[in-house]
Amino acid sequence: LKDIPSTWRVMSPTSSYSMLALLLLVAPLPSADAFLLQDTTTRTSAADLRRKSCLEMSKLSDLPKGINPFEKGVSKSLDVQADFRERAKHAVDAAIRDGVKKMELEFPPLLGGDQSKSQFDDFDNIQELDKNKDWTMLFAPMFLGKEEEYGNGKTWLVFPDLKECELARAEWAGSRYQTATFTDIQTATNHLAGDGSYDAPWGSNLVSGVSKLMGGSDGDAGLLGDQNALDTLVEGENSPATLTLVIQPGNGGPVEDWVNVEKMSDANPDTTTIIVNGALDKVRGGYYPAVFFPKLAQTVDRFYKTFESVFYLKPISDKGVYGWIYRQYPEDWQVVLQTRQSDGKGGMFIEDTVVYTSEERPEYNDAVAKLVRANAEMARAAS
């Protein structure tokens, strides 16, 4: 790797701009097919490309620590999710200042801690949902510094169903968590868009009817959850919300969740809506055929393609090559290659190399192709 300009590698936040300027002057010029691939509409000299790359990289955030697939022990020793929340909070704050109202947070919720799991481990939807619930419960209080805006129930925690709301209410009983409004997609949709507007999943009405029948004179038997876990939504008090955090809608649950989230947002356009790990790539990417899911298909262009991915961290891999698609608002998108390198003393270290940046989100297959190509180029340069 001695021939790869060091200015093309991810610099730590403590790297000085003076050092960057010095490297710009002394580093050898890269070849035209350099490892960092930047979209351009005009022909650019190798020198211009190098300078542009260095300037861009000086504005990009490093990858979070402890997420590489080579050192699982490191992930287990770090609070990776706390780092994610800090980065997400900075990104959300920047987006709010810019007037963005619809945001997406997408990241691996199981990374970090004693039970850390990556995309290569076995896990189920319940584990994911539990982690996303806990992550959001810890994320919401980070906005309480502005009590008038986000306190007094003005931050809504919208759970995918009543049972999840009940569990969160019981597990996070502290006053700093109870300051938020606890609700679910069904209740929020009917409140905001009008009674009866909620699109119910197939079979849910049957289960609800059985629950009420079993409850008899005592009311609902609670098969779907305890109604007492829901906060009452009152116009002029906790409604409309300033901030709505929607926890894992649709992903692993009914597709109607995504349809209902659009109704909630459209009925309250001044509220900032943040979807936490809602698998919007599946919705936007046509995973659900329009012929079978026509209502969902109608939401894609008019709603879900308008979301800003303010914190996005997705693992990609192919042919033994590993990396990430990463973006933290308002920065550009990055494709980052992770490789194991020798330290020359018998040890190893992990190197993060930005191989592509763009203002637009890279397609998954394109990102993988760029990752594989850059890895091959680096291997040739090192040989």
Image (cartoon, rainbow, N blue to C red):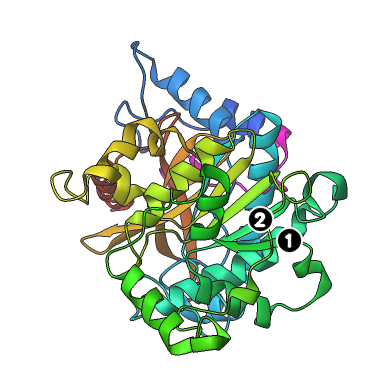
| Amino acid at dot 2 | Trp
Instruction: Based on the picture, tell me whether residue 11 belongs to the magenta stretch.
Output: yes
Residue 182 appears left or right of 279: right
Residue located at (30% from left, 51% from top): 282
| Amino acid at dot 1 | Ala
Residue 247 appears left or right of 235: left
Q: Position of residue 10 (x, y in %)?
A: 54, 47
Instruction: Based on the picture, tell me whether residue 187 belongs to the magenta stretch.
Output: no
Q: Nearer the viewer, residue 45 or 90?
A: 90
Q: Quadrant of residue 279?
A: bottom left
Q: Quick one: SS at disc 1? A: loop
| Tag 2 residue | 156
Q: Nearer the viewer, residue 253 or 370?
A: 253
Instruction: Judge whether residue 147 can be spotted in this image.
Output: yes
Q: Are marks 1 and 2 in contact (CB under 8 Å)?
A: yes
The magenta-colored residue range is 1-19
Q: Position of residue 373 (x, y in %)?
A: 25, 45
Q: Nearer the viewer, residue 8 or 75?
A: 75
Instruction: Judge whether residue 378 can be spotted in this image.
Output: no
